[in-house]
Image (cartoon, helix red, strand yellow):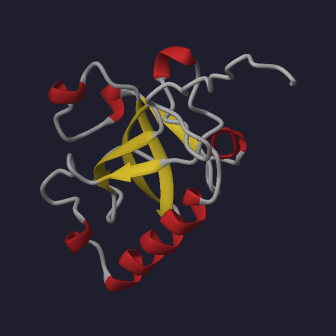
Amino acid sequence: MGNNKKHHLKRPPLNQGKNLKVPNEEEGSTNNLTPHFSFEHLQKGFKISDCSKEQQQQLATRLEELSSMTWNQIILSPRHGLGLETISHSSIKPPTEEFKDKRLLSIRFAAKNPMVGFRQGRVFYFLWLDHNFSVYSH
């Protein structure tokens, strides 16, 4: 009666399931993913607590906006809007020796105040919240 073949379900790799796939940077670009943000490298004098209350509110709003975009959308946005720009290490006034192998990026967070850091995969690591325009020459 019918087919006696056993059907085996193919097991998905451990890094993915029905509704989840963990990106593998070796597989390609993370530009189609939304950004994640990390404050673990914020430098003294340029932390959230050094910003005015208004700048802190604008930072929260900007992070909410950026979190709903992909890296491609951010890259293609105007640099003084929701976009980003590359900043050379020689333009940065605070020491950058610890991060010399990183490509420094600037994203505006409060009016034209930039948050400067680096991107690794989909994560943007903040180094300086330039609340007083003293991190680099504008």
Question: Extreme right residue here?
Answer: 2
Residue 24 in the figure: left or right of residue 79: left
Residue 73 in the figure: left or right of residue 58: right
Note whether residue 55 is visible.
Answer: yes
Question: Extreme left residue here?
Answer: 44
Residue 133 is situated, as x and y percent measured from the top left of the image, at: 36, 58
Placement of the N terminus among the 4 image quadrants: top right
Residue 7: quarter of image? top right
Q: Residue at x 32, y 64 (%)?
A: 132
Question: Extreme bottom residue here?
Answer: 53
Q: Residue at x 36, y 76 (%)?
A: 56
Residue 133 sits above or below residue 89 on the image: below
Q: Residue at x 55, y 27 (%)?
A: 12
Q: Nearer the viewer, residue 122 or 60?
A: 122
Residue 72 in the figure: left or right of residue 55: right
Residue 56 in the figure: left or right of residue 61: left
